[in-house]
Amino acid sequence: MKRLILVRHAKSGWKNTRMADFNRPLTKKGKADALTMGKRLWKNKLKPDLIISSPAKRALATAKMMAREIKYPLGGILMEPSIYNSDVPKLLKAVRNVNNAVQKLMIVGHNPEFSEFCNFLIPTKIEDYPTSSVVIIDLNVKGWKGVSSRKGTLVSFDHPKRI
């Protein structure tokens, strides 16, 4: 059994319309939400063995803020370029390439890719995947290479507005 924690990056800003999408920073609300969700992960003892993040500024900032809250070493966050502007096959490949010693994997990335990936992994549908959402999926596989469609069970779906 493997556990996958999918985190959509926190709210980011469009203040500077000339800024490249890749470089968009988190807003004040986004930073607060990332901290809130990190605290919820810590409270529920959901510390991953590995965090992989999109290298986009907003995703990496979310990963780092959550990592601090769950006492995960910042230097242990891996950046995976394929998570930015991704799709289900690229996300699946990233997951399947994880070392089997990792039991709990957290990936921080983007929508709509994450909602599509969730809906690929679990038999139920998640329609709305707000910023800072945390989806926890248990995968009935021995190794990450065995991850495929509908092998997952939704354990929880949390986001900042859900109290």
Image (spheres, rainbow, N blue to C red):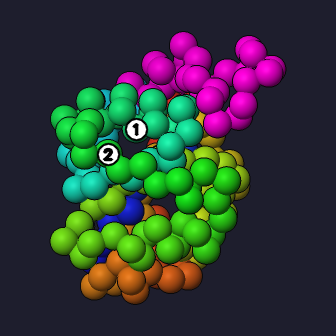
Q: Crowdedness of circle 1 by 10 Å Cα count: few (<14), some, many (20+)?
A: many
Q: Amino acid at mark 2?
A: Ile
- Residue at image location 80% in from the left, 21% down from the top: 18
Separation (CA) of disc 1 from disc 2: 8 Å
Q: Relative to 54, is 10 above or below?
A: above
Foreground pick, 20 / 74: 20
- Residue at image location 26% in from the left, 30% down from the top: 68
Q: Is residue 35 left or right of residue 68?
A: right
Q: Position of residue 72 (x, y in %)?
A: 21, 40
Q: Crowdedness of circle 2 by 10 Å Cα count: few (<14), some, many (20+)?
A: some
Q: Which mark is residue 12?
A: none
Q: Which of the 4 quarters of the picture holds residue 14?
A: top right
Q: Relative to 121, is 111 above or below?
A: above
Please tell me which of labels 1 and 2 falls first in the chain: 1
Q: Is residue 18 visible?
A: yes
Number of callouts in the render?
Answer: 2
The residue where tag 1 is placed is 63
Q: Is residue 156 visible?
A: no
Q: Amino acid at mark 1?
A: Ala
Q: Is residue 21 left or right of residue 45?
A: right
Please tell me whether residue 20 belongs to the stretch shown in magenta: yes
User: Is the N terminus in the top left, top right, bottom left or bottom right quadrant?
Assistant: bottom left
Q: Relative to 117, is 41 above or below?
A: above
The residue where tag 2 is placed is 77
- Residue at image location 46% in from the left, 55% down from the top: 80
Q: Position of residue 129 (x, y in %)?
A: 63, 47
Q: Position of residue 153 (x, y in %)?
A: 44, 72
Q: Is residue 37 left or right of residue 12?
A: left
Magenta extent: 9-35
Q: Secondary structure at mark 1?
A: helix
Please tell me whether residue 30 belongs to the stretch shown in magenta: yes
Q: Is residue 8 left or right of residue 49?
A: right
